[in-house]
Every structure is written in C-alpha cells, then in structure tokens.
Image (cartoon, rainbow, N blue to C red):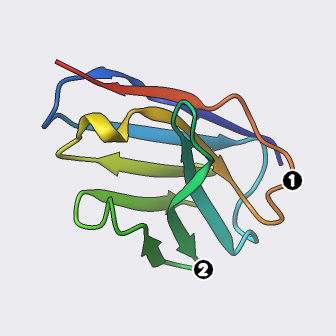
C-alpha cells in the first residue's frame, strides 16, 4: 500500500497538531505501523509505533505528549501531538516494515 501523510503546519510552542497517514489500501493485516521524523541536518528517527490492535511504543522525547492510533476502517494511522516544542520541528513520515520506501512526509514547524 502507498501511504500519504498530512496535517502538518506551523504551530506555536505548547500547541497541538494531529497528523494523518492515509493508506491506499487496507491496513487491517499490517501489524506494525510507525511515525518517524527528520529534522534539518539530523538523521531520521522513530517517533512512535503501533503494533497489532493497540500496542504502542514511543521515543522518550515524545512520551506523554504524543499519541499514535489507528483506524482500520478508515485505513488511517494518526499521530496526536500535544505540548509541542521547537525541537519537534521536522518532516514527519509514516511507514511500515521493512521501511524501504518513504513518502513525501508532512512538515511540522513549532515556532513563536
């Protein structure tokens, strides 16, 4: 399936955004889905994973602020981001194993 990210934008520190990852086909059988991000000059890093029906894993830097979820009926994975910080500024991507093809991503900029 192809994945298309959306929902990014410019937000002030402390604000919230919800990112969406829409799949071109069913995600019902896809066990692991993840959100990643890449800031300028830095390597791409894992932000959050959702495994199976709802098991989750978060990077330490976002734990307690971000929430990953999936809607199999809508073939969409979400990333709710609260209490955003300037260091969250990056291009955000969603992907599934084996993570060998990446989409365009969606830009998130946190700035006053």
In the displayed orientation, state which residue is furthest to the left. 14
Question: Can residue 73 be seen by looking at this rendering?
Answer: no
Between 32 and 46, which is closer to the camera in this rendering? 46
Task: Report the label total.
Answer: 2
Neighbor class of circle 2 (other Cα within 10 Å; few <14, some 14-19, many 20+) is: some
Q: Quadrant of residue 10?
A: top left
Horizontally, residue 54 falls left or right of residue 15, namely right
Residue at position x 57%, y 41% from top? 42
Q: Which residue is mark 2?
A: 52
Disc 1 on helix, strand or loop?
loop
Cα separation between marks 1 and 2: 21 Å
Q: Position of residue 65 (x, y in %)?
A: 24, 57
Q: Position of residue 78 (x, y in %)?
A: 46, 50
In the rendered image, the vertical position of residue 42 relative to residue 55, given as above or below: above
Q: Position of residue 25 (x, y in %)?
A: 78, 48
Horizontally, residue 61 falls left or right of residue 96, namely left
Q: Position of residue 110 (x, y in %)?
A: 28, 27
Q: Quadrant of residue 34?
A: bottom right
In the rendered image, the vertical position of residue 51 relative to residue 43, given as above or below: below
Between label 1 and label 2, give the one nearer the viewer: 1
Cβ–Cβ below 8 Å for labels 1 and 2? no
Q: Which residue is mark 1?
A: 100
Residue at position x 30%, y 46% from top? 81
């Amino acid at each position: 399936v192809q994945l298309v990210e959306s929902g990014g934008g410019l937000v002030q520190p402390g604000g919230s955004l919800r990112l969406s990852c829409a799949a071109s086909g069913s995600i019902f059988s896809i066990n692991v889905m993840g959100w990643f991000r890449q800031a300028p000059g830095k390597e791409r890093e894992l932000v959050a994973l959702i495994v199976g029906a709802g098991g989750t894993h978060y990077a330490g830097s976002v734990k307690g602020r971000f929430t990953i979820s999936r809607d199999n009926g809508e073939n969409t994975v979400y990333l709710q981001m609260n209490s955003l910080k300037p260091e969250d500024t990056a291009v955000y991507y969603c992907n599934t194993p084996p993570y060998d093809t990446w989409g365009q991503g969606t830009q998130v900029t946190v700035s006053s």
